[in-house]
Image: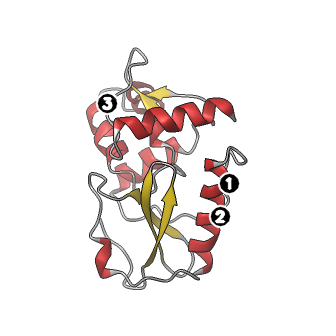
Amino acid sequence: MKYSDKTVRCTLFSPWGPMTLAAHDQALVWTGFDGQKHAPDTSQWPVANTHPVLRLACDELQQYFAAERQTFDVPLDLGSGTEFQQRVWQALLDIAPGATTSYGAISAGMGQPRAVRAVGGAVGRNPISIIVPCHRVVGRNGALTGYAGGLGRKVALLQLESRL
């Protein structure tokens, strides 16, 4: 994954552990739980707690955790992935709060019904957890499958959204 040399970061303490958020001048580029699979090395990015994009993202996520927000307005930059990954991540943005979909439904919706495993790989590498709702993707029969931030967090996020 590629990131701008102007990327900065901050820490947000969520109900499920600390998260690192990163942005460049105009958009959020990373949001993930500390220790999350497929995370970039965020230690190289300077801390910028007052960065306007990071402040907005933190405020919106805190509202989400308090069940006061369902959608996000913070600008996103999903350009760190391949063209295929970006298409999958855009598809994730279409999953409504409180709803779920399957990897197969995403691949079929992209016109590539045989790309289920590739979709799964792209979902697992989603660079903007929660805001790009990869936690809303489940297995074919509704089974809860992996989540880069941990399956327990996936369950908690889905439970939170059922209360919204």
Disc 2 on helix, strand or loop? helix
Residue behind mark 2: 59
Q: Are marks 1 and 2 in contact (CB under 8 Å)?
A: yes
The amino acid beneath tag 1 is: Gln
Residue behind mark 1: 63
159 vs 146, nearest the viewer: 159
Q: Position of residue 11 (x, y in %)?
A: 46, 69
Residue at the limit of the structure toward the right, as seen here: 68
Label 1 – label 3 distance at C-alpha: 33 Å
Label 1 – label 2 distance at C-alpha: 6 Å
Residue behind mark 3: 116
Task: Tell me: 32 left or right of 148.
Answer: right
Q: Nearer the viewer, mark 1 or mark 3?
A: 1
Decide which of tag 1 and tag 3 comes sooner along the chain.
1
Q: Position of residue 30 (x, y in %)?
A: 43, 64
Q: Residue at x 42, y 40 (%)?
A: 153
